[in-house]
Image (spheres, grey):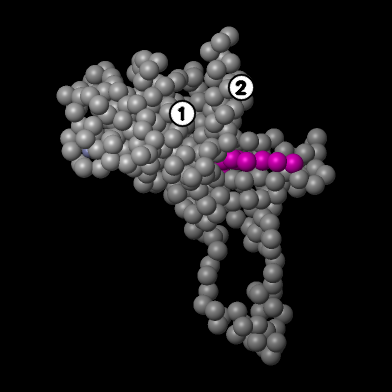
Amino acid sequence: MWDDFALLAGGQRCSTDFTNTNQVLHRDSARFSTGPFVAPRWVLPTVKLLALISPIQPVIASMVSSRPRTYSVEAVVVRASDFAEADRLITLLTPFRGLVRAVARGARKPKSRIGGNVDLLRHINVSLNEGRSLQSVSQVQSVSSLRGLHSGLEKMSTGLYMAELAERFSVEGGSNPPLFNHLVRMLQVLDAEPMHPLMSRWFEIQVLRLNGFTPTITQCVDCGAELKPQGHVFSPERGGIVCPECRAAESDVLLPASLNTVKLLRHIARAQWEAVRPLHTGEDELRQIGRILKEHLHFVLDRNVRSTAFMDEVTRWRSNT
Ligand SMILES: [Zn+2]
């Protein structure tokens, strides 16, 4: 009975290995050619001493100068704010360096060459100078324009929510190419396709999976028993579906999870977007799965995702017009 989730997908099953790490390895090759080199601790003092006593002192001195290094990286702008008189402070999500914070000097000037490319949700190739305190943008090129994303409030608010969620699961210097690929992929889907009620749900459960926080949805999270057709609830605190025998074991918050909701969760956790897109789901299942994933994310992150409220408000406004 629990294997008939295929009915929801029109009989299709797909592998969840949808990421393309090799592609990013290729695209972000600058990391390997210009990334930081960590030398043993004794190297710098020794070279400095040689610079003082050697006849080739000018050459060696230039090698240890504090001139900023420049590197290029593929990125998505996940946060941006005004800074000083005409600058922008941006946070970039990158495949191998995680979050990178940088200043785009002069980006708000009308004739700036980089201004339009450092706006929120831009997918770019960017050259950065590594300064002592803050990195600065020297050049930017657009990778994909994602113009459709900026054409409507609903798509924009959903894109901002996805970007914030990816940011919350990232740290500075933390390599995570699958997460970067997943965000780019979903921004491209948002850009090219009409809105779909499962877009955000699929994005959420894949982000959880890529970071090792997939909820337990194939058996009882407490006793491991096979799930029966009725009486399930979801416990964000315990991290999965709880069977009727275990539901009273703790006094945590329990969320309704119908049979169809559990089937839907199991399907979108393992399917590619192409196998999720054809699904037509009922209002009850959408409501339940939305609440389950929202509460599970809240428990994993230990806080709310701020842009959720904005996205929900826009979605409600759209459904009432
Ligand atoms: Zn149980």
Q: Which disc number belongs to residue 283?
A: none
| Left or right, 87 with reference to 72 | right
Vertical relation: 43 (above or below) 114 = below
- Quadrant of the displayed image that contains ligand 1: top left
- Going by the numbered disc 1, the residue's amino acid type is Ser
Residue 145, quarter of the rendered image: top right
**Residue 25 drawn at (x, y percent):** 44, 49
Residue 58 rendering spot, x and y as whole percentages: 72, 80
Compare residues 238 and 80 and report the one nearer the observer. Answer: 238
Q: Are marks 1 and 2 in contact (CB under 8 Å)?
A: no
- Going by the image, does 35 lie left or right of 265? right
Q: Quadrant of the C terminus?
A: top right
Compare marks 1 and 2 and give the one earlier in the sequence: 2
Q: Position of residue 15 (x, y in %)?
A: 28, 34
How busy is the neighbourhood of tag 2: few (under 14 within 10 Å), some, or many (20 plus)? some
Quickly name the residue at label 2: 153
Q: Which range of residues does the magenta coloring cover?
A: 75-82
Quarter occupied by residue 50: bottom right
- Residue 79 magenta: yes
Q: Main secondary structure of the magenta part?
A: strand
Query: Residue tagged by mark 1?
Result: 200
The reply to whether the magenta stretch includes residue 106 is no
Q: Position of residue 213 (x, y in %)?
A: 37, 44
